[in-house]
Amino acid sequence: MGLDEREKAILDFERRWRMLPGPKERAIRDHLCLSPAHYYALLGRLVDSPDAMRYDPMVVRRLRRLRHHRRRARFEGRSAEGRPSR
């Protein structure tokens, strides 16, 4: 089936957003015309997509790693940075 243009734009944005000025949430609104909540919901689905993996394997692997670390930290009762959660 492949990715649509918006899905490709989300993955492209995720690859390069650190080079953009300002906070990520503002860049999401400015560059993709999406609310951050909608962006992260779409990105969460893309991370599990075989089409996304074919399109940009480095970004998808990085996002899967980050998700794994966040889930593991939550399960172990600490923040993703390694500090105890309150």
Image (cartoon, rainbow, N blue to C red):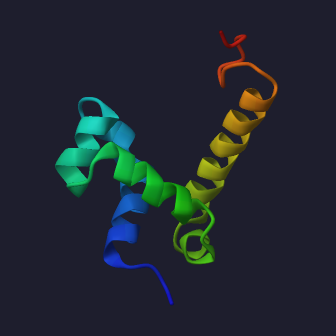
Q: Position of residue 40 (x, y in %)?
A: 44, 49
Number of marks in the image?
0
Outermost residue toward the bottom in this view: 1
Q: Is residue 84 left or right of residue 56?
A: right
Q: Is residue 1 above or below residue 9?
A: below
Q: Report the quarter where the C terminus lies.
A: top right
Residue shown at the point (30%, 37%) measured from the top left: 25
47 on left or right of 35:
right
The residue located at (52%, 73%) in the rendering is 55
Please name the residue shown 66% across and 51% down the image.
Answer: 64
Residue 5 image-quadrant placement: bottom left
Q: Nearer the viewer, residue 20 or 37?
A: 37
| Residue 51 to residue 72: above or below | below
Residue under the point 60% across and 71% down: 49
Q: Nearer the viewer, residue 42 or 23?
A: 42
Rendering coords of residue 75 (x, y %): 79, 31
Residue 32 sits in which quadrant? bottom left
Identify whether 39 is placed above or below 46. above
Residue that extends furthest to the right in the rendered view of this protein: 76
67 on left or right of 2: right
The x, y position of residue 8, in whole percent, is 39, 69
The spot of residue 81 in percent (x, y) is: 65, 20
